[in-house]
Amino acid sequence: MNEYFLESRVPPRLMDALWAQGWRHFGAYFFRYSKTGQGDVMPLRMRLAEFRPSTSQRRVLRRHADLEYRFGPAHSNAEAEELFAAHKVRFEHNVPDSLYTFIDRNPAEVPCECLSLTVRQGGRLVGMSYLDVGEWSSSSVYQFFDPALGRRSLGIFMILKCVEYSLERGLRLYYPGYAYRQPSHYDYKKRLGALEYLDWEGGWVRLST
């Protein structure tokens, strides 16, 4: 499977349906595929009512107690672009050109409601995550952080804050993106807990770890 379409405005209930069918998007570009050169794609989702933070996840939250975080309408600016430029040096292959590879220049509304999670240390932006919100689901679009803080598991911290926000909003499902059946650098997502994966035959299956 390898499909795509373009759409700049999608209502919340339809976003829920698209995520449930394995679709993701960068700006107005929607896509889904079952295989890449890295392996077999596994779209993931979390059943929020069943989620309980693990011991290691609680440790991550305590480790970042010195940071300030805030959710607000999705935005991009020179500060975010500078952080993204620092973040992308972590990539050896398929290095993205810019932040706008992943978001529209009007990210708060295209193609749906989207929030920015900003994380600061002493006033300095050190992490940023974009979270889409549907009628009863949320989905992480992209996140990036200061590579100097890579050992602090800042990416996991931002995911956990997106989970907390989704629970506070009364949502049922959270989509953290995808992993692969084969070992990859996305394996950390498989350990989030309360997860299902799409089997590409229309069904979501409990993920055993």
Image (cartoon, helix red, strand yellow):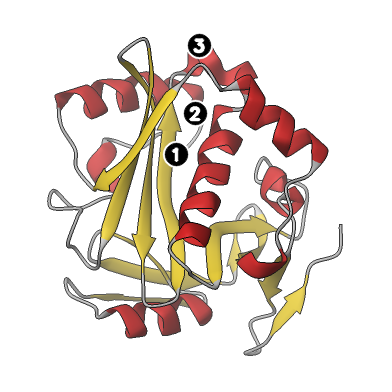
Q: Position of residue 1 (x, y in %)?
A: 53, 79
Residue 152 visible in this rendered orientation of the protein: yes
Mark 1 — residue? Answer: 94
- Depth check: give the residue in front, 67 or 114: 67
Dividing the image into 4 quarters, which one contains the C terminus? bottom right
- Depth check: give the residue in front, 11 or 100: 11
Q: Are marks 3 and 1 in contact (CB under 8 Å)?
A: no
Disc 2 element: loop
For residue 132, which quarter of the picture? bottom left
Q: Position of residue 189 (x, y in %)?
A: 67, 49
The vertical placement of 204 against 100, above or below, is below
Amino acid bearing label 1:
Asn
Disc 3 vs disc 1: which is toward the camera? 3
Amino acid bearing label 3:
Ala
Residue reaching furthest right? 209
Choose the circle earlier in sequence order: 3 or 1: 1
Cα separation between marks 1 and 2: 7 Å
Question: Which residue shows up at 62% across the image and 65% down it?
Answer: 48
Question: Which residue shows up at 17% across the image and 62% down it?
Answer: 109
The numbered dot on residue 148 is 3
Q: Is residue 203 left or right of residue 103?
A: right
Q: Position of residue 22 (x, y in %)?
A: 52, 75
Q: Position of residue 126 (x, y in %)?
A: 39, 20
